[in-house]
Amino acid sequence: MEEDASMKFFSDQNTSYADILPPREARARIEVSVLNLLRALNSPDPAISHLSLINRKRSNSCVNQGILTDVSYIFLSTSFTKSSLTNAKTAKAFVRVWKVMEMCFQILLQEKRVTQRELFYKLLCDSPDLFSSQIEVNRSVQDVVALLRCSRFSLGIIASTRGLVAGRLSLQEPGKEPVDCSACGSSGFPISGDLNLLDSTIMTSDARYIILVEKHAIFHRLVEDRVFNHIPCVFITAKGYPDIATRFFLHRMSITFPHLPILALVDWNPAGLAILCTFKFGSIGMGLEAYRYGTKTQTFASHYIPTVMMVFDSSVACNVKWIGLRGDDLNLIPEESLVPLKAKDSQIAKSLLSSKILQENYREELSLMIETGKRAEIEALYCHGYNYLGKYIATKIVQGKYI
């Protein structure tokens, strides 16, 4: 059966991004979508057509490789997957989309902002038969974003954040006094989940480096020791895998201070490399929202593979360099501090090696991990003393040992 054009919900358009809309316009798009559905139901030959949703699987990912810049990122191509009420496997997903859309409409009417976690608990109360996990809500939200072509923020949904920042940076939100991030103590300053607020925050800094730190405990040590006084830098941590707010904050810093190198300090294991790659290249899970937060790479010529681009995650793709830990640091670490790779490490390594975007020197590091069957954590450097981390970073910077 030929698909009803009214049910495509913008999927036939050539736009490749999610708009940032005022609440009134976002509500209007929801209303138009509902009217299209009702029109299909009330037609002489009632039929509910498929919802065409962008395929967000790795198999649909492609690579943007810079020519005049070494910044690359991944994006989604034009492959679609379909969700239908008449298909037993996708019927629930079909209904979830409309339920999330209804909830977003209510949020916009009430002029509220909620996190996806808050939205999950509300949906769990209202529709327990439809939603039983956070991941079901997250997927449905991304589906609504794709159908309506508007960002989560436009739908009243803000990003949860675990991110912290500290060091030689001043942040001034609209209408507020500046915050000195070097005077916030070892806990650092929390990064807001409001992307619009982050976008309008004024940033000033005399730093010479931005240093991403995988672990909160390492971030705490570096800030408590005030390493940023000896190495003029700004420390950022997402406490593990980066959330979108922390990634967007880094994106803002890379745009505001394009001359500052971005260096990543992560564990020498597949998960540490995966975290670095998420900061460096982005992730395919961001869907259509990515385009709106394109990095400075958009001003350069690029080679697209393939040439047809639909969705990409340049929102937070940055020219991140890997400062440590790396294979050539193993001589600094006692043999007893090396830990065997776990089954999960092997799974992550396999996934990374299958990625089209992983650069050759990163593949070499990953292969060394697999070959030795070992992993090393940043804390292993404490064998040289608790104040050694600052010296380690300074030595790496002076010697230019980052890739």
Image (spheres, grey):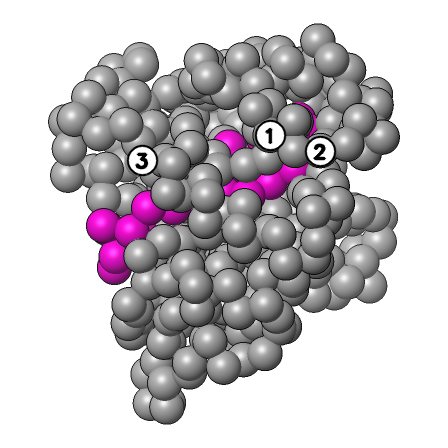
- Label 1's element? helix
- Label 3's element? loop
Q: Which quadrant, please, contains the C terminus? A: top left
Q: Earlier in the sequence, mark 1 or mark 3?
A: 3
Q: From the viewer's side, name the closer residue of 75 and 381.
A: 381
The verdict on residue 135 being magenta is no
Q: Estimate the x, y position of residue 357 in percent, counting from the top left.
A: 44, 19
Judged by depth in the image, the label closer to the viewer, 2 or 3, is 2
Q: Estimate the x, y position of residue 105 in percent, counting from the top left.
A: 53, 64
Q: Earlier in the sequence, mark 2 or mark 3?
A: 3
Q: Mark on residue 374?
A: none
Label 2 to label 1: alpha-carbon separation: 7 Å
Residue under label 3, please give it. 16
Q: From the viewer's side, name the closer residue of 11 and 40.
A: 11
- Label 2's element? loop
Residue under label 2, please give it. 333
Label 2 to label 3: alpha-carbon separation: 47 Å
Q: Residues within 10 Å of mark 3 (few under 14, many from 20)?
A: many
Where is residue 229, by image quadrant? bottom left
Q: Is residue 136 above or below residue 49?
A: below
Write the start and end of the magenta stretch as one range: 254-280
* Residue drawn at x 42%, y 33% as measured from the top left: 402
Residue under label 1, please give it. 329
* Residue drawn at x 61%, y 47% as measured from the top left: 214
Contact between marks 2 and 1 (CB within 8 A): the answer is yes
Q: Residues within 10 Å of mark 1 (few under 14, many from 20)?
A: few
* Residue drawn at x 53%, y 28% as measured from the top left: 56
Q: From the viewer's side, name the closer residue of 255 and 109.
A: 255
